[in-house]
Structures are given as structure tokens and as C-alpha cells.
Amino acid sequence: MNTQKKKRKKKFSAAKAKNFLSQKSIRLAAFLSLSCFYTEIVFKLSVETSHTGSSFVFLALFSLCVGLVVSGIISLLPKKAVQILIPFFLGFIFLIFVVEFLVYRQFKVAYDVNTILNAATDALGGFGADIRRLIFCFDGISHIALFLLPLILWFVLREKITGQLSEKGIRRRRTGQAVYSLLAHLAGGAACYGAALFLILCCGLHKEIYTNQYNFESAVMQFGLGEGLCLDIRNLASSKTSAPAFESAEAEFVQGTVDNTLVSSKEESASGGKTVVQAKEAAGTQEVVMLQEGTSSQSTKTEQENESVTPVVYGQSVACVDFAALAAAGGNCADIDAYVSTLTPSSQNAYTGSFEGKNLILICAEAFSGFLIDPELTPTLYRLSTNGINFNDYYQQSIAGTTGGEYQLLFGLIPTSGGSSIKEITQNGTHTNMGAFLNDKGYFGMAFHNSTYTYYDRHETHTKLGYSGGYMGVGNGLEELISPKWPASDLELIQETLPMYIDKQPFNVYYMTVSGHSLYTFDRNAMSRENKDAVDAWCAKNNLSYSEPVRAYIAANLELEKALDYLVKTLEEKGIADDTVICIAPDHFPYGIDSDAALGDMPYLSEFYGYPVNTYEERDRSRAIIWCGELENNEPIIVDTPTSSVDILPTLCNLFGVEWDSRLYVGRDVLSDALPLVFFGNYDWKTDLGHYNSSKGIFTPTDENAVIPEDYVKQISSIVRNRMTFSKSVLSHDYYTHVYNAASVSK
């Protein structure tokens, strides 16, 4: 009799638990899961143009996981608490997605946690006009309404969703029922997450993005913004606690004997005698190609191979630090030391030290593009870009907006901590950038920015770049010298600051310009309005029917042309043009041309470039300039191999003859024998042999007839991953301070 009662009681309890789960929690779980999935879908369709079926499956599974876990926890609380916490949760989701949506509309990239916390506040607040334009238009208002819909539905349906929840929560329930409900929700969430993880790890490309080729933007596009943020937080935490994991797969490998292989040459061209550093087909030759990290996959040949020439033996670009010994000594940086010790330094060359003792003016040009350069419209830019070192296949990786572009130019690294990268690397001073190098040589230095001096915390970071004369922007002195326009005039910037250093030779100056900044309209951009007539006349003369955003963009950048014209003429009048080097590189592609576009749907940028912009390589192609008056006495140096912003600093180090170590940068001296390699934040890469699309796993050779070495894609991909890991490790382990201290001891 007692046994039968126990069985009936057990069945009754199970039924109640089941009833509790179905009646009091399933509606809430379904509502939250659908809300998350819906918000992810709206965001995905708004910022992407190409989609894969698998990404929607991941969105569904991750959303279901969130809905089950959150509802399981919240449903244990009293009804009043639930009715407060649910709108708070939905409001938090709304805020995150709206901020990321606006960031993507403005900057055409998704911002990771570091960038959101350290840069987006400035970016969203500083350019209020741009943000208001993005919000108060049909695209902005409609998307905000779409993101707000789950919160609105909650207030409409909350009684139906929460009507059966206990007024006092778990205190009015049996503990067993509450535990049963919570465990069921957690188990369901875990099952969904496990299923998503299983599918990800079963696919090579998805697995790479999720693990060793993690990239925030790729993760967001493939797994959703929610999971992308979770992955980013996980990676941030692990980077501070775990040792960096470098791959050993980058050891040299042999291509074998091939015909018509591509070889690199620095030669006197038959057409004009120009010095060329390029990829060239050597028909009929046979060659064994050795590839090693830090070394070009091509040999160096000249046209006069039949002549007996005594080769010049150059040293290597290395410092006095024994990295193998540092690795053996152990410590937090031992793994990084061990990795660096395996790298082959690039060789010095005929250009090493050719700029030693000369002045340097380094310019990070806001939204500058090589497609602006025209012999008639921008004669000074054309002169500088064609009579110095000509970068004919240059890319500006756009990873963290302006501050990311500055970081790449100043430090020769990828900004793996997004908008906080400069802040992190300058915490303990700087040791590996041109400001520090030339300051050690007794140069007078200054840094300038013709916008708010505190923007992106430059008042904290740029005072630590090694410039002896300090940093000046609008707010700590420059506002008294230039007109209060937006954007400010680069011409005025040069005119007012040049007297501060021109008679203090040798000088080392850094400019972050602003004239080329968006918004690109003639009525709301002072620089576009200033130069409108010149652009309209040029378009009319050349029968060009550019749209207003494109014309306004070109007009804004004419202020940089005027500034450079004034700068070069003043240097020549002073008689120091031959002793002064001007280096110019952009901070990012001109993302402001298109206001509501995404990669693959950038009509105005495509119009300006002259081809459809569908990939990072197509989007980030630009031009860099290294010019010195002295170079105009000779034929220009042409670099046809792929180069990018992280190559500028190593190249300058070689040219100025500073004591530097080529193994401490992920870029290369473009005049050396180092491997020509450009890689992007999503782990796409390009060499002189071809381009690799990591998301599709496709390698496209530059020359379809060329013989590609065995395992070439695997080896280069490994090198790219190691260089990304090194960039992360420099920040997470303050590696440059470690090396600087070791070098000080060895001296």
C-alpha cells in the first residue's frame, strides 16, 4: 500500500515538474530565443551582402541557447523582478546592436570590445553630425525601430508570457521543481551550444575562424554578434593569462625544380633605367626556391646574368639581443623569445642608411587614397609618388579605424587590441618607432593633429612616442593658430607648424591630418566646399560625371595637396629639400563615401575606384609615398611587390640606418630580400605569387602558368597566423619593454 502511494506521489511530482516547465518557462524561453534570433538576423542582413546557410543555423542555435539559459535563471525570480529584468535584458541587447550597427554604417567594420570601450565613445561622440545623419534618416530610423521591436512586443505580451509565474518566485515553489526547471533549461542551452560547436569544429573554415584564425569581424559575420562578443571577451581574457601559441610549420620548404618560375629582381630596367623591385618571370630558368619566415620566396637576379659580377655582401638587420638565450632563461616572454630566435632577419641592402641624418616628416593622412593622385589635379602628390619610392601594389589594412591605421604606421604591427592598441603599447614608453629611434640620435621631434588633442586619448599616447618637442592638437595650443572649421585645414596646419621645427635640424615630425574626413557633402564639409570649384572644373574638363559624395571626397583631399605643395616649396626655398624625407600613408580607406553600405555593396567607393569593391583586398588598395628631394636626381625606385602599412616603419628604419631588428616587426623592409606578404585582419593574404581568400579557402595565383611550391598556402597561412600571434603578444606581454631592457643590459 505504501509502495503504491509512493509511486503515485512520484508520478504526481514528475507531472507537476513537467507542468511547471511547460507552463511557466517555455513561453519565456521561446520569446527570448526568438528575440535574440530576430535581432541577429536584422543586424546580419543590414551589414552583409553575401550569406551562407550555415551562419543562419549558428544564429538559431546560439539564440536558442541564450533564450533557454536566461529564461531558466530569470523564471526562478518573483514575477515583479522578471518584469523588470526582461526589459533590461532586451534593452541591453538593443543598445549593443544599435551601437554596432551605427559603428558599421560609419566605419564599415564591426568594432570589438576593446575598440568599443576605448575608441567608439570618441568616434560616436566626436563626430556628432555624422552620427545624427545616420540616425535621423530613413535607414537609421527604420533600423532602430526594427531593433526595438522585441522590447515593444515584451510590453504588449508580458502578461501572457509571465502571467503564470509565481508572484514570489522560488520561495513559493518546491525546491525540487525549481531545480528541475533550471537544470532542464541549462541542459537545453548546453545541447544547443554543443550542437553549434560540433558543426563549427567539423568544418575547417569555420573551425579556423573560431580558433586559431579568430577575427572579430569574421566571427560576427559567421556566428552572430552575440557569439562574436563572447569569443572576443574569451580571447581578451586568455591573452592576458595564457602563453602565446606559435606554430612551427613555417620552417623552410623546397619548391623543387621548376620552369618559368617567378623571381624577384632589383634591376636597371631596359626602359628608362628605373630601379625596380618587382615580381618578374624568368623564362627558361630553373631554380630551387627556399621559403623561410622572414625571407623572400624569390631569388635576386639581374639582367646581366652572363656577366661575372662580384656580389656585394650585406649584413643583417638585427640588434644586439640574443633571443635564444633569453628564451632559455625562461620568464613570461620565453615563448615569444623562442619564436623570434627562429626567424631569419632580412638583409641590409644598397639603400641601408641612405637617409641617415636627414630630416623626416611622417604623415598619416586621413582617409587618403592612391586613386586621388592625378598629374593635373594633384600635381604635388603625383610628383612625390612617382619621383621617390613608388609603391605600386600597396594596401592599407582597415582594422580599427583611424587609431588602428596610426598604430600600423607608427609601430609596424597589426592592432590586435583594436582601438586600445596604441594605449597599451605606450603604457611603458615606446622603443621601436621612429620617434624613439631618431630621438636617440639627437633629433628634434614634434607630433601634430589638427583636431581635438584628446581624441582617442592622444594626449596620453602621443606624448610617449619619443618626440622631444611634445604633441600639439586643438585644445593644447593649435586652436590658437588654425581656423575653427570642420574638418580643419591641412594647409593651415602645415603653414602654422612648419616654423616650429624647420630651423631645428635634424628634425623628426609626425602629422595626423584631418582635412580628408567625412561627411562628404558640399554643404556640410568645409574642405569640400573650399575646393568644390577646382574639382568641378577638373571633372568638366575630363568629362567625368562623378556623384556628389565622390566629388566632395576628392575636394576635401585637395586640401592635403595644397598643404604638401606649400611644404615642398618651403623646403626648396630653405634649400633643405634634398635633406628632408616626406613619408605619407593613409589611415584607412575612405569609408565615409558610402553611408549605408557594406562590403560588396559600396556603390560610391566602387565608382571612385573604377571597379566593384567586393573583397578586403579590393577595398584596402591604396598608395604610400616615400620621397626625398635627393631621389629626384635619380630614376625612381619602383616596388611592384605587395606592400602594406606595416611595411613602412621597417623600410624607414633601414633607410635611416637606425639600429633595429627586422624580426620584431610583422612588416618588412620593402627594399630587402624579405618575403613580400600582405595580410588582412580576416587572415586573407597576398604575396607576389598570388592571393588567398581564407573564408573560401581559395588561392588564386598571380600568374596561372607559374608553378606554386608544394604546401605553399599552408606555409604562408602559418606565417600569417604567427605574425598575428606576435602582434597580440607584443601587447599582452609588453614584449618591447622586455626586449628593450635586455638590449640595455647587453650594451
Image (cartoon, helix red, strand yellow):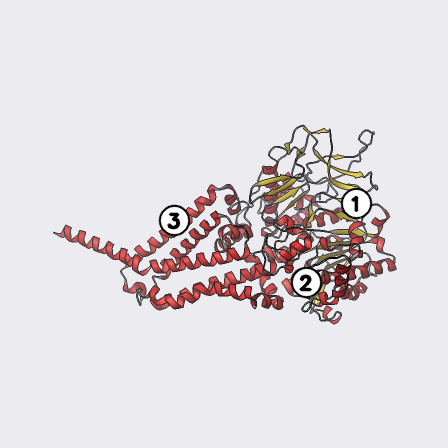
Specify whether 173 is left or right of 610.
left
Q: Is residue 428 visible?
A: no
Crowd class of label 3 (few under 14; some 14 to 19; many from 20; radius 10 Å)? some
Residue furthest to the left in view is 1
204 versus 67 height, above or below: above
Q: Comparing marks 2 and 1, which lies closer to the viewer?
A: 2
Residue on which the image places disc 1: 637
Q: Residue at x 71, y 71 (%)?
A: 484
Most foreground residue, 375 or 578: 375
- Report which quarter residue 111 is drawn in: bottom right
Going by the numbered disc 2, the residue's amino acid type is Glu
Give the SS element for disc 1: strand
Q: CA distance from mark 2 to mark 1?
A: 36 Å
Going by the numbered disc 1, the residue's amino acid type is Ile
- Report which quarter residue 539 is drawn in: bottom right
Q: CA distance from mark 3 to mark 2?
A: 53 Å
Mark 3 vs 2, N-terminal side = 3
Residue 535 spot, x, y in % from top left: 75, 62
Specify whether 157 is left or right of 588.
left
Mark 1 vs 3, N-terminal side = 3
Most foreground residue, 735 or 683: 683
Residue on which the image places disc 3: 191
Give the SS element for disc 2: helix
Mark 2 vs 1, N-terminal side = 2
Q: Comparing marks 3 and 2, which lies closer to the viewer?
A: 2
Going by the numbered disc 3, the residue's amino acid type is Ala
- Report which quarter residue 483 is drawn in: bottom right
Most foreground residue, 640 or 413: 640
Q: Is residue 232 visible?
A: yes
Q: CA distance from mark 1 to mark 3?
A: 60 Å
Residue on which the image places disc 2: 548
Residue 397 spot, x, y in % from top left: 64, 51
